[in-house]
Amino acid sequence: MSGRARGLVWLSSLLVIAGTIALIVVAIVVDKDHPLSTLSPVGRQGRDIAELINPIFIVAGVVFFLVQGAVLALWWRYRVSGSETGDGEYGYYDDDEFPEQTHGNNRLEIAWTIVPTVLLAVISVFTLVALFALDDVKASDEDITVTVIGQQWWWEYQYHLDGDTDTPPDFVTANELVIPVGVDVALDIKSRDVIHSFWIPKLNGKRDAVPGRSHDWVIQSEEPGRFRGQCTEFCGLSHGYMKMVAVALPTAEFAQWRDNQMTPAEAPVEGTPAGEGWATFSQQCASCHVVNGLTSAANRGGAAGSPPDDWDIYGEHNGGSAGPVLTTELVAGAAPNLTHLMTRGTFAGSAFDLYLNAGDHIPYLELADSGTLNRGELEAWIYNAPERKPADANDLRGMPARTGLSPTDIDNVVAFLSTLD
Amino acid sequence: MTVTDRTITAPEETLALPAGPAIAHRPLGVFTRPQGSEGWRSWLFTVDHKRIGIMYGAAALFFFLVGGAEALFIRLQLATPNGSVIGAGTYNGVFTMHGVTMVFLVIMPMAAAFANYLLPLQVGARDVAFPRLNAFSFWCFLAGGLLLTSSILVGGWFQNAPDGGWFAYAPNTGLLFSPSKGIDFYAVGLQILGIASLVSAINLIVTVLNMRTPGMSFFRMPVLTWMLLITQFLLLFALPVITVALFLLMFDRLWDANFFNVEAGADPLLWQHLFWIFGHPEVYILILPAFGIVSEIIPTFSRKPLFGYHFMVASGIAIGFMGWGVWAHHMFTSGVGPLSVAAFSVSTMFIAVPTGVKILNWLATMYRGRLRFTTPMLYAVGVVSMFTIGGLSGVTHAIAPSDTQQTDTYYIVAHFHYVIFGGALLGLFGGFYYWWPKAFGYKLSEAWGKASFWVMLIGFNFTFGPMHILGLQGMSRRIATYRADEGFALWNMVATIGAFVIAIGVAMFFWNVYASTRNWRRAGRPDVGPDPWDARGLEWMTASPVPEHNFDEDIQVDRLDHFWHRKYGKDESGRVVRAAPTSEIAHDGSNTNVHLPSPSYWPIVLGGGILLVGYGLIYNLWLAAAGLVFLIGAIYGWILEPADDPDAAGHHDDHHDDDDGDDHGDPDSNGGPSGNGESASADEPAETEEATVG
């Protein structure tokens, strides 16, 4: 390679390196519109983690520049071009072309063994302190405990306002976890089928939901807001569509929300579209979906009045053969509890927005009143859910299609759902 | 003692007996040895470690294309939000197969290619300890690789591909949650690959321990030999663990066992522990061979001995040991308890120390050297630079609390690609360029090599660099798509473009192989000489390509870098000077008197039997039974096979002909496809190219 070409390689590689670094800096500094970002935490635990890791990022960055700088400096300083002898290609050295033949230096070796060891020992002390502090999840200063249950491919939240997870929950909701601002809310994370992982990046790190196990975790937000989450343990076909939202409300608003959630739904007036919709819903949907005050155990295929916890999650579908994993008490049924569907901003495992003008523009408690329903998406979902969000082909998991419903039926079902606020 | 007794009682007859009658006894005609060392058939039956190494390399490059195509599909799907290039089901199969292919069918066999080709040469041996087992390792690997890869096609495009991720966490891999045949292919395929690697590991360990040339003590072995030896020990102890896990999984799926059935009381963390007790040493199985290759290349092109040889060996051993004590850092969020998390967090951090020692020793080797940036050197320095990035990000997620934010995000994807692509794969490609003239007798083009390196390196950084940012911005792994309002679009598009730049770089490598081969043939196949880079190891002390018998005579080694010190000495003033011309020291391959193991039919037959058993387990147990009969037959054939075939006139008897050319009296040897009109000596390289390109 000629000197000119070599210079071009140098120039271009330097440009590439400088450009990349500039882009990274820009990307990190301008961390807007990244609702899942770990770089701008809002929760106490998230901030503790950031405070621990940010100095380590800086140390790592310094080591990065030292090593890369050393590589480039050595390259620049000690490179030689092709030999005059041989056939002129690189790799042929002249017989007398020798640098000093050093074999090693024990002091240096010991030094660069000990220095990183000490550095890492210091880091590990900070790590362990933070680790045990973060793991102290019983530090909750309120009694509220939420049992978080992952299943393919959505999240169920069972609120125990007295913190006693051994008794039935006070109310059950799905996908959107609402917490009061500034309060450490204890989570009891479980799974009904495969392993999932509960993660609201702006609030805290993730914790796996493992069938047969119960994991304690805690979540807290310093500010009101809506924070996105994503299931982060691969959980099968629709893993990518298994999302969730955490909503932090000021204490008074949280109380208002809580009281509303504890209210059962009222039956719509017969003869209205909503009434027709309820009739369709009770035949087509209520075998899985619970609406407090309307559906009953009979809807879900069990004997009337039978306790819901010995109901097999997939029993209806797999003909009572060897049942699937069922390791936590089943309160909502095999699908999200829809009693207050319209108070949520998203549906279908938070994969879709329930309101077109949702998000941060409308106070959370006013969504049902002021939101513009994302009617097209909701109707498409009711008609053929597996087309909108991949579900298992044999209908064992995910919401089955209801392509037998006429457009009028679907309009009526949506009218019924709209009353669930 | 008994020998002496027998000699006394029956002197002449007993001594004369062994060869004749025993060999004459051939139950069924097939139990002779195959003949000839030319033509494509001879590749099927070869037991030559060099040909087996070349076949490992060729197969790995083939699977590299498969795994690379899968990567491109992943990047196409993720290029834009709400991607719909491939559906979620196919996507899960594609990313699972990408991981499985790249780990088990690309990096591991590429390292096996170097281990097979170079280990015997570097320790001055004639072949590996068990040549037929070595051939069996390859065919068994190929059987497992083809079985796994065929899952993409059988029953429809990605209908039966494994879809549980390469880590295959229970219970998602149970029959209820993954009803296709995919996980069966995974469980059976990886068990077959495990047999191949295990057999190979034992073979290579015995080779290094027992077959070193006189004077080659442990601390005179090249660092590559050391790293490969450590790798084989890691394989020896890690593979049984994954085999147990796969065995249990297979029983769960095929015969309704309950090892991972939560309803029956199983704890899914059992699988995670078993998988990662294998899975973390596996990471070092992937990277240590590349560390060894880098440790060979940098001294050669710095014109200095490796800095801190003993520390390089010791740090490799330290990594090998510490690699067993860090597995649960894959499980920081799994709920293993704070004490376990604390212990594994700290142990993981400290594994950075021996790795750092290696990086610094490589830099110290370059310090004050005369650095020639040939293609192999570019790749080696690329490893130093890129692996450092992967190592540093590794430390950041050894910090367990921050790992709860990073794990299962693209930050991890970025990290391990910097380690496995930026470390292992770049190192192995550097090895291709470096030892290509040794294996095939000509160099690959430097111009194409350098261009391809830079394209690959730039593409690599544009693909995986942005993934650090994506991960910290919260993008999870293994999601088939993402919402437009999650803010991941920009860097995903950059990464996708980068992936196609890598593809161009890889295509340039393959073009380089083709064009360099063609140019070398057109130029009349000039001899590259035994030692084209003026290097240090024993492998450069014999002709290129290496003759079948490796060395003309045993080498008496008297120090580390023996070959180098034969070439160069010091004069009175302490200056390094040429002591003797390379041509006088290096062997020319002219000794035809070296005893070599004969080819054998049985390794490939045995491999075929295992393939049948594999498909049989998945689809029909009767087929498995037939495969078992086949397999047992092959084992008997193997045992009954005569040590040498008396019919192979002068070709594969004790005094082996090294195919030097002029005196080819044996008609069998002219059967090769490229034999006509060319000198016999040119046949062997011609075949090796075909094998590599194919």
Image (spheres, coloured by chain):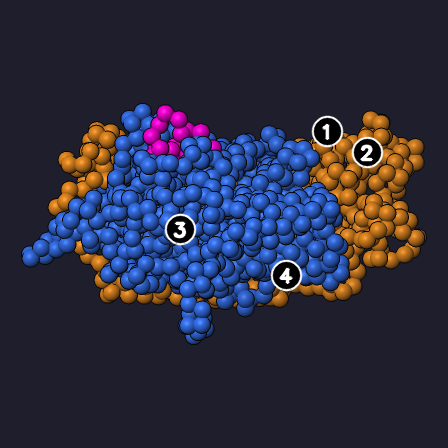
Chain colours: A orange, B blue
Q: Earlier in the sequence, mark 2 or mark 1?
A: 1
Q: Are marks 3 and 2 on the same chain?
A: no
Q: Is residue B684 magenta?
A: yes
Disc 3 crowd rating (10 Å Cα; few below 14, some 14-19, many 20+) is some
* Of marks 3 and 4, the one in the foreground: 3
What is the span of residues highlighted in magenta in the rendered image? B673-694
- State the residue position of label 4: B270
User: Left or right of B44: which side holds A174?
Assistant: right
Name the residue beneath numbered marker 3. Answer: B654
Q: Say which residue label 1 marks.
A: A376
Which residue is disc 2 drawn over? A402
Q: Between residues B116 and A291, which one lies in front from this camera angle?
A: B116
Horizontal and vertical percent for residue B471?
50, 45
Residue B668 image point, x, y percent? 44, 35
Q: CA distance from mark 3 to mark 4?
A: 53 Å
Circle 3: residue type = Asp
How crowded pointer 4 is (Cα within 10 Å; few <14, some 14-19, many 20+) is rated as some
In the image, B92 versus B210, the foreground residue is B210
Amino acid type assigned to the residue bearing label 1 in the image? Gly
Residue B78 in the image: x percent, y percent?
A: 55, 35
Q: Earlier in the sequence, mark 3 or mark 4?
A: 4
